Each structure stands twice: as structure tokens, then as C-alpha cells.
Amino acid sequence: MTALSSDHLAADNVGGLLWEPAAESLPTAQLGELQIERLRAMLENAYANVPFCRKRLDEAGLKPGDVGCHGDVAGLPFTTKIDLRDHYPFGMFARPRDQIVRVHASSGTTGNPTTVGYTRADLDTWGDLIARTLAAGGVKPGDLLQNAYGYGLFTGGLGLHFGAERLGCTVVPISGGNTERQLKIMRDFGATALSCTPSYAMYLGDAARDRGLRPEDLPIRVGFHGAEPWTNELRLQIEAGLGIDALDIYGLSEMGGPGVAFECLCKKGMHINEDHYLAEIIDPETLRPLPEGEIGELVFTTLSREAQPLIRYRTRDLCSLTSEPCACGRTSARMSKPIGRSDDMLIIRGVNVFPSQIEEVLMSIPEIEPHYQIVVDRKGYLDVIEVWVEVGEDIFAETMGDLERFQRRVQAQIYNVLNIQAAVKLKEPKTIQRSEGKAVRVVDRRTAL
Amino acid sequence: MKVTQLTVFLENRSGRLAEVADLLGSAGINIRGFSTTEAAEYGIVRLIVTDPDRARTLLHEAGFTTHFSQVICVKVPDEPGGLARVLDEVATAGASIDYLYSISFQNICFAVRDIDRAVELLAGKVTLLSDEEVRAL
């Protein structure tokens, strides 16, 4: 590997770049030592500054100094999304509010969202991790990134934005939607890189073709696509549609957003930024660690976050890990694409939705019968969600207008709480499937993208 | 004088309206008049029947959602201008009509997606009326 500057940007072996060559190609033994050193500092921070973490560690009879090797990690307590919600808004922060320079929040949650806070140093680290992500796809200073992730509380938009600026790109903060303008700017500005959800990348490729734009008319070379699960088949379609390398990126707001793991140009799993995140795979039933290569639930412990250290956070994503060396030269372990969830969370156009949240909305409307069904499907490349409810005599009046008003009212309430457009379908009584025991509330007709 | 109307919620599935008619017919309840809303994903059927209470109980037991309401029924002289005179009186009374349909039917009229195919399939099974026959009713 050839260093282009003293500490940033060296070429990897497959056409990408290492943003932090020393850290990204650290020999695994040293990486392991660094992880333990950072883990102990992280536990000290959590124990001293987050009452919840202190209580959990005390209950487990552990002190931060008790962790001396990777084997000790399995003894640490887990953290879940419920814990984060219970400490809304700032109860999980390890720094006073005036040292928090930014707060993001998870998408699509009812009641209390889960919040994520950053110190100045956390934002700097996040920027570096996104710069690593982009550089791995061959993006270098001077490239123009069209960032079509949504800007706002969602971590995707601002995360990619500041990481690309840190790398030295020209960033176009176009955010999501308005396909006509996306294509015009992509061509007129000469975008060389794109970031957006995989389904939107597919949609853009189709829209370009419909308007007579060929891949060679667009200088774009590489795309970074995350926030929803996708397959290698979709990758090939996106790549053909836009004439790019389409790379998967992984993150979750609880870990600070995108930048947790990313693909290099080998496209063989996502490199985990292991110097900042300690990854484990556990059996979601027994909660015991699983051997390398087995599919289980991904669990992360933050190693460097100041504002919000999280111990063994259960992501609920199911995947496997490998530490086989990668041709690119990075020494980090790689995670497979998540193949599902260990809970019932749905991802609808990048927004996380739990069926229980829809149920809460429905149950807050007294006329609705306690039977409902959620049907998720895909039209073209976009997710659509239907909520089926039965029309009982409390809802039914004698005009269509009354029924339509009722439909609109339920749709508006779902939108207000979950920020998703659901189509409410009215069904005759007793036509929604009842099942023995636990009702089947969700029918997901989407095939893998 | 007010008349009880029975309204039924129906999903737009093939054969569902026939089920309602069957149910009432086999119980000896005669349909004096009815109307349906234009079909979308669901619709409603309004019925004037000979025994509304029993009809409602039967439909309810069969799993239909129903509703009772009061409507006005008026005799319309069968001659040119007959309907106009009635509607004039309604307008003079300051009443605005939410919906209107004709009852005491012996003939019905409906639209389907593929009319040629429907005509072909129905011929011989029901009495189809021609343009001229309808004009001469």
C-alpha cells in the first residue's frame, strides 16, 4: 500500500482508498489489544457518567476494570431499545447536555423515540468513519457526492454529508425525492458518487433510462446504499442501471448512524470499524455467543463514543461475521448482509416500523375492532403498506362519505405517529384471518430486493 | 310517513351481492328496491325489504355489517314530467337529496367491465332486454 499523505489516504489493493491506513490495516493482534484498552475506558465512562450503566454493571457484580480480555465481554449486561426509550431523552448520555453538540433520533417510533447524542469528538470520529466508507469505494477529495439520503433527525443525511466534507468531496445536499431534479443535478453538476437507499437507487436508474439517459451519459462511478436490506441481485441491477459500483453500508442510529460497517470494492461483506465498535453474534434465544460464521443476532459495544457509550446493544439484525482476510488489505472482520430480524420490526421505505406501533394507533380509535392485518408489499421498487380493519357497526353509517372520512382519519393518525403513508382498507367483519394463539398480524409479500 | 331502509357494507368481491339476495330470498323476504354505490374496493347496498327486522338479523348472523336508517318513499306518476313534479316539490320544501334510487322494480340495469362477454354468458339464463324493449316498458 502506498501512502498518499502522512496519515490519510493510501490505495487499497482493489481500487479503493484507505482513509486511515494505519487504523484500517492494523494487525489483528494489535487491533484486539486496542479494543480491550478502549473497552475499559468506555466502561469507566459509562460507569461514572450513566446511572443506568452503573446499575446494570453493579447488578452483574462487575467493575469496569474487571474486563481484561475478549472472553470477559460475554459477562457484560445487554442493552436494548427499550432501555434507550426508558431513558428518553437524555438519560443515556454520559456528558452534560451543554457538551452535546448534536442530537439525532431514530425513525418511526411511537411514544418516545430513541435519541442519540454526539460530542464534538464523536462527530469528528463519525466523519472519519464515513470518510473510510466513501474512500473504500474509491471516492477521493474532489469527487462530487450527491447525497439523496433524507436530512433531519435521521442519521443518514447529515452523517454522509459531514463525512464526505471531511474527505474533501463537494457535497450536494439534495436529500430524498424529486426524481426529476435528482437526474438533472446528477448530470448538470457531474456527480461522481451517490448516496441513497438501494430502492431509490434502483428507481433513479429506471427513471434515467425512461428519460433516454444512458449510464455513460452520467459521470457517476459509485453508490453507497443502506438503511434497508437488499440483495446481490438488486446490486447488479443498480450497477447496470446507473453504470456504477453499488456498495452496501451499515449503521443504526443507536450506534451513531451509518459508518459502523461498509463494503470495499470486493463486495464480499461489510468491514466493521472494529477499532470503534466491538461486534458479537449471539443466539437471540439463549443469548450465548455463537462461533464465527454462524448466523445470529448482531450485538455491538461502542468503543470510542463519548456522549453515548452503549454496552452490548442488541441490534436485532441477523447476520454472520467472518475474520477471513479480505483481498483489499483491511484487517477488520466483515459482517454479511443482514438476512432478517430477531424481532418483528418492518423497514418501510427506510423507516423502521414495529407492528405494535400500528396497533397502538388502531387501538386508540374506539370504533375499530380488535382484528387487523398489516400487509406490506412492493410496487415497482417502493414499499407500500396496507392496514386492513374490519367494518363493525360502530363504524358503519349509511353513506360512502362516512366510510371514506373514517379511512382518512385512520390514515392521518398513522401518518402523524409513524410518519408513513399507509392505505387503510375496509373489510367485512370476520374476514381478517384469526389464528390459534398469537394472531398473524403482518403479511410481508415483498420478495428480497 | 317514513320508511326503514337497510344498508349493508360489502367488500367488492364477486358474488357477494348475490349472497345477500340469496339469503333474503331463501328466507322469503322480498326485495322491494335497492341501490348499490359504484364499485371501488368496497361499497354499500341500500335495501327496501318486506321484513327489515328479520332481514337485518339474518344478515347480521351471516356476518354482514348493517345499518338501519329512515328514508322517504314517493309514488312517481308514470308519465313525462312525473319525476320532475315530485322533485320540484322536494326542492320547494328546501330539502336537499343525499341519494335517490327507484324502488318497486321488475327490471334492473347495471354496468360491468366486459359487457360483451357478460351478455354472451347471460343470454338464455336471464331475460335480457334490448334498447327497444326498454323504451317500450
Image: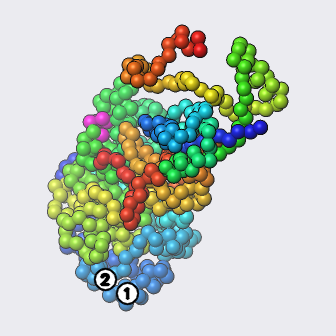
CA gap between label 2 and label 1 equals: 8 Å
Quarter of the view holding residue A47: bottom left
Expressed as whole percent of the image width and height from the top left, the position of residue A283 reads 27, 71
The disc labelled 1 sits on which kind of residue? Ala
Where is A325 relative to A146, above or below? Answer: below
Q: Residue at x 57, y 24 (%)?
A: B106
Q: Residue at x 54, y 65 (%)?
A: A112
What element does badge 1 sit on? loop
Expressed as whole percent of the image width and height from the top left, the position of residue A218 reads 34, 32
The reply to whether the magenta stretch includes residue A95 is no
The answer to whether one can see residue B25 in this image is yes
Marked residue chain, label 1:
A
Which mark is on residue A75? 2
Q: Residues within 10 Å of mark 2 (few under 14, many from 20)?
A: few
Q: Residue furthest top?
A: B132
Q: Residue at x 79, y 32 (%)?
A: B95
Confirm or deny contact between disc 2 and disc 1 (CB under 8 A). Answer: yes
Q: Residue furthest bottom?
A: A61
Q: Nearer the viewer, residue A229 or A360?
A: A360
Where is A40 relative to A327, above or below? Answer: below
Q: Nearer the viewer, residue A141 or A229?
A: A229
Left or right: A67 as drawn, with respect to B71: left
The span shown in magenta is A238-244
The reply to whether the magenta stretch includes residue A243 is yes
Marked residue chain, label 2:
A
Mark 1 — residue? Answer: A60
Are labels 2 and 1 assigned to the same chain? yes
Q: Nearer the viewer, residue B55 or A363?
A: B55
The disc labelled 2 sits on which kind of residue? Gly
Which quadrant, please, contains the N terminus of chain A?
bottom left
